[in-house]
Image: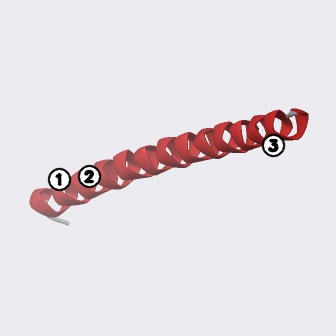
Amino acid sequence: MTTTVKIGAAIMLLFTLASCANTIRGVGRDAANTVDATQNAGRNVNHAAQR
């Protein structure tokens, strides 16, 4: 393999790993938001039931 191909492959690998890390962080944020929304909905239902 030529040096250019090796450098290109290394750059592609770095981009792939970086995008994977961003996806994992995004999924984690989405899951946390889902939990927060579920807890807020539960509080709203509880609050409405007490009235």
> Label 1: few (<14), some or many (≥20) within 10 Å?
few
Q: Which residue is painted at 20% across and 66% down in the image? A: 1
Compared to residue 21, the image places residue 1 above or below, namely below
Residue 20 position in % (x across, y down): 44, 51
Residue sitting nearer the eye, 9 or 33:
33
* Label 2 SS: helix
Amino acid marked by disc 2: Ala
Per the image, label 1 sits on a secondary structure element best described as helix
Rendering coords of residue 11 (x, y %): 22, 52
- Front residue of 41/25: it is 41
Give left or right: position of 15 versus 50.
Answer: left
40, above or below 27, in the image: above
Query: Mark 3: which secondary structure?
Result: helix
Quadrant location, the C terminus: top right
Q: Is residue 21 left or right of residue 43?
A: left
Give the x, y percent position of residue 31.
63, 45
**Residue appearing at x 10%, y 59% in the figure:** 4
Q: Position of residue 10 (x, y in %)?
A: 26, 52
Q: Separation of disc 2 and disc 1 at Cα?
A: 5 Å
In this rendering, position of residue 17 left or right of residue 43? left
Q: Residue at 81% of width from left, 43% of height from top?
A: 45
Mark number displayed over residue 10: 2
Kindly identify the amino acid type of the residue bearing the numbered disc 3.
Answer: Val
Residue at the (89%, 33%) spot, across then down: 50
Question: CA–CA distance between discs 3 and 1?
Answer: 57 Å
